[in-house]
Image (tube, rainbow, N blue to C red):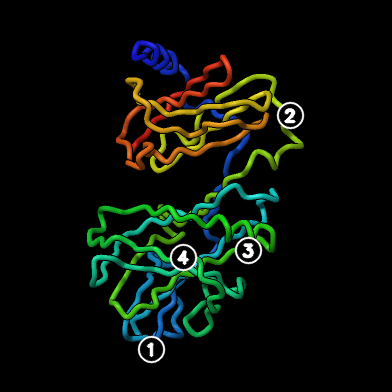
Amino acid sequence: MKSFFTAIFLHVMFFSIMSISHLAAEEYYKPVADAYVRGGENADVNHGAEELLRVRGSNSEDNRRKVYMKFDLTEFSFADVGYATLWLTVDRAVGGGNIDRADFYTVSDDSWEESEITWNNAPAPERFLFSVNFQRQISTNEDIVYELDVSEYIAEEVADDKIVTIYMYDDSLADTDTRIFSRETVNPPELEIGIPYSVKANSIKTPDNVALIQNYPNPFNASTLITYTIPKREMVCIDVYSILGRKIKSLVNGIEPAGTRVVKWDGKDDNNMNMPTGIYLARLQFEDTVKTIKLLLSK
């Protein structure tokens, strides 16, 4: 088994990691506006166009802060959303406890402007989405990236007006303070939307052959997408192996319809443990056909 995978590795080493399907599996959006607002004596102050977005809970309204992020998805031309991920890079989380919390909401009005929003005129929260605990983080030299699932909310907005506001607030009395990089920085918030290939049916014919297309991104840090095609409804197995041939993760194991599909690997094994930096192999088996590609995980 090891000699088989070593041969595969030597072969794929010559395959350019930039050889990626021209069919995009996802689209990325940065905020068109983001800002934080502060209560009390700062209720009329605008905090747009700053480098850090701050969400803070406090027993004093003067010190409370809440964050608004607006995304314009009007260029998103597909009717369906496969998944949606909000990526946030935290510069610091310096509250009094070990955990800084933030509650995420929808809002009632998306018409706010970054240069005008204040505590007094900010739109009200509409529907609670979820809570996130941010790890206490004093040093500014160790940014932490958070991957948040917003699929259901984004799917609703894509079906509606495609203007999305995400609101962050900590309503606790604890002295928390989470600082997130804004759109004015090199680490802005980012909304990733996965596009199901089924929505592109008009432009994609049933494939004649089995294909395992080079993953994207590659190298990758948090997750990567693997595209594959099969010519008929049949059993498909896609597994991730170490370069020495040890099975790491089962990604697909079942009967799939004919067509082109996308599967995501989050860099973890079947026990949900993070895998270290290195070279891994994705192996597709369909009937007697086996396809393999190289995955470059970089932590």
Distance (Cα) linking label 4 and label 1: 29 Å
Dot 1 or dot 3, earlier in sequence: 1
Question: Does residue 293 appear to the left or right of 174 in the view shown?
Answer: right
Label 4, label 3: how far apart the Cα atoms are: 20 Å
Q: Which residue is mark 1?
A: 41
Name the residue type under label 1.
Answer: Glu
Q: Earlier in the sequence, mark 4 or mark 1?
A: 1
Count neighbours of disc 3 (C-alpha within 10 A) and say few if under 14, some if 14 to 19, many if 20 or more: some
Measured Cα–Cα span from mark 2 to mark 4: 39 Å
Q: Which kind of residue does numbered mark 4 sit on?
A: Phe
Mark 2 or 1: in front is 2
Q: Earlier in the sequence, mark 4 or mark 3?
A: 4
Quick one: quadrant of the N terminus? top left
Quarter the C terminus occupies: top left
Label 1 to label 3: alpha-carbon separation: 31 Å
* Residue at x 38%, y 88% (from the top left corner): 41
Could you tell me residue 110's position as x and y percent? Answer: 60, 71
In the picture of the structure, the residue carrying the numbered disc 2 is: 205
* Location of residue 220 (image quadrant): top left
**Residue identifier under label 4:** 130
Find numbered disc 3 in the image and state the secondary structure of the residue it sits on.
strand
Q: Say what amino acid the circle numbered 3 marks.
A: Ile
- N-terminal of the pair, mark 2 or mark 1, is 1
- Residue at x 63%, y 26% (from the top left corner): 234
Q: In the rendered image, which residue does mark 3 sit on?
A: 163
Residue 182 at what x, y percent from top left? 43, 61
Q: Earlier in the sequence, mark 2 or mark 3?
A: 3
Q: Residue at x 25, y 60 (%)?
A: 137
Circle 4 — which element?
strand
